[in-house]
Amino acid sequence: MLRCALCGHEVGGDALRCPKCGGPLQFDYFEGEIQQASRVWDKFADFFPFKLENKYSLGEGNTPLIYLRRLSHRLGVEIYAKYEAMNPTWSFKDRGTYLAIHYALLAGYRKVGTVSTGNMGASVAAYSSLAGTDAIILTSREVSQESLIGMEIHGANVIVVDGDYGMLYHRALEIGAEKGIYFINSDNPYRIEGYKSISFEIADERDADYIFVPTSSGGLYRGIFKGYVEMKRCGFVERVPQIVCVQASGCSPIYTAYISRAEHVEKYENPHTLAHAIENPYPPSGDAVLKILRENKFSCVAVDDQAILEAQRELASEGLFVQPASASAFAALKMKISRGKIERNSRVVLILTGAGFRNIGHLDMKRRICKLEELERCVK
Amino acid sequence: MLRCALCGHEVGGDALRCPKCGGPLQFDYFEGEIQQASRVWDKFADFFPFKLENKYSLGEGNTPLIYLRRLSHRLGVEIYAKYEAMNPTWSFKDRGTYLAIHYALLAGYRKVGTVSTGNMGASVAAYSSLAGTDAIILTSREVSQESLIGMEIHGANVIVVDGDYGMLYHRALEIGAEKGIYFINSDNPYRIEGYKSISFEIADERDADYIFVPTSSGGLYRGIFKGYVEMKRCGFVERVPQIVCVQASGCSPIYTAYISRAEHVEKYENPHTLAHAIENPYPPSGDAVLKILRENKFSCVAVDDQAILEAQRELASEGLFVQPASASAFAALKMKISRGKIERNSRVVLILTGAGFRNIGHLDMKRRICKLEELERCVK
């Protein structure tokens, strides 16, 4: 049963927001058994809203959980990276897109859409081409060339929208409802179900005390939380870890509401951060995240661009080239440790949401040129 | 035992080429059993030259084998994509780098190096940072900004070498021997062992009649062949599939030697192709590939840039954004089918070697801009 994540109102059909309060939707908790299988979708099949067929899959999920040895030693905690850059279009979005497009086909849609400045657009474009549906990607003027190509290469209809990007989410849902286009936006309920798979995979490998989640619209955060709650209800884990909501200081609407004890998340004016993948000034699941944070006494932090860039370099020094938004998780961990908020030897998982290559404009380069005949001298 | 892939001379220590004939080196065939495990490295542990520890791993391998439904129906064969863009640095190179850097550490090296214009450089830089070794990446003036950043972000010492790129492979080995730097070039014997894992994974999932392998230095081709030979010797597969060597017409030294029945692969003058990842004019394993092709009656084809770009779009229309070099495998399959060389309903595997984002300069874009208030009209 689908219901509003805020007011609990039951919703039928393929509504995408609560008709009563406008809140985001969510499936009731699933229960079941763990199956013998290798794909997370088969292993946890009881926990997804319908039977997931392999033919709409590009092999998403089952990403590695990598122990960061040197950073762990340095900081006195056990740090694991959930490396989502190894998905088919190189971000965690693929997990949600797989379920959402699969559902769109079951529901008879021939057109899907999304609103995205990068990862989600590439993901919807790719899965839509696999499924044979038409895809419409609405994006902003700030989107990078790398991101646009990642959408267009799959034949999607990409429209750069000139106007308030925060409004686009809601306008897209309206237009989609009129024109029979299923818009798979950031916190679509099937996305939430897809993102749960990250929690299933982590818990399958090890216990965690903390999970650090870069948070923009709130869809990923809600998915990871729901996955753990379902596992706890079924006795697969003893407790839900502390799930830390991480935002960039330059665009931190949830953090702002959290520390000011506001009732609702308000639109963040003049957002500005290098971590574009978490630069949503008006997160559609903001209030739903705030509710989880408060009910569970979870924490929320904001980290600035300098700390994010330093964290990006540090993760790269352990072999992982992630986007700035992903690096915010590590920057937040360091901040929490420096404030004495993380017990020694805690087991911490960083959700490294996507690959570093879609936003490279900010990266400095020290290029050394050497003539072949002088190579011996150049190589120290 | 390590021996020359051409003359069979036994070689000890950490020689990187045959001291007698200059040929590339190769381990003797391994034999063993398949273990119960999920990582390919553990499942086929008997077939690797030493025990592979997880701490030098970034989660490489175990990539999906994706059935391409529409392209299969169109062409009348069963086409599967081995999607190597889902490795940690987004190409198959990671499988070889994992083994080679692991070996370098066992052998006591503190410095590693490679010669690369893209994927291999990023891979060696990433694994070297994980392992804590120093990395020296020698690259050419033609390397893309995306590729350079992929190397430098991990703290590697990147040197752009001005001079004959074909010579650099050999010069690097000489300088490495002098200075105690272990150069993990394209056909390093540990790379070959790492690339075998692709064959193990394919055979573990299904029988194949043909494998199409984009071929540059020859290391990948040799690895895939060796993997199948070992499995046949142990009775895991009934036969070795036809392994098709694919080159770009604009840089096709192996193909040229193959069709002209030459004894040796000669340097290809004035190479020019968009498929930069297979643009090696003087492949160090060229003669070794030629030997395999002739002894096994395998075929070799060359495809032009136009066919490669069309193939890149077609693969993207099934959800897979690969680099032009990878797309050459599909272009070659279409060419072979059009010539009546592939039986109907054959099972074909394309090795899609790496992700499309490192070379995007050639991709056209049709960007549509629309004002938010006119969005309804723009969305058809």
Image: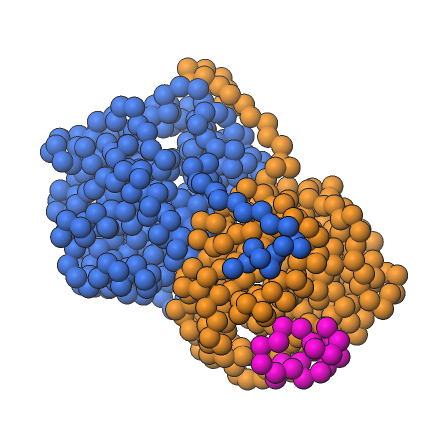
Chain colours: A blue, B orange
| Residue beneath the point at 70% across and 69% down | B241
| Residue beneath the point at 63% across and 72% down | B16
The answer to whether residue A367 is above or below residue A167 is below
The answer to whether residue B229 is above or below residue B364 is below
The answer to whether residue A142 is above or below residue A312 is above
| Residue beneath the point at 50% across and 51% down | B151
| Viewer-closest of B361 and A364 | A364
**Does the rendering let one see residue A208?**
no
Q: Residue B244, position in %: x, y?
A: 73, 62
**Does the rendering let one see residue A271?**
yes
| Residue beneath the point at 79% across and 74% down | B295
- Direction from residue A223 to residue A131 in the image, left or right: right
| Viewer-closest of A326 and A8 | A326
Prevailing SS of the magenta stretch: loop
| Viewer-closest of A166 and A302 | A302
Please report the bounds of the magenta region as a residue range.
B1-22
Q: Residue A337, position in %: x, y?
A: 18, 52
Q: Residue B188, position in %: x, y?
A: 61, 69
| Viewer-closest of A143 and B32 | A143
Image quadrant where residue A307 sits: top left
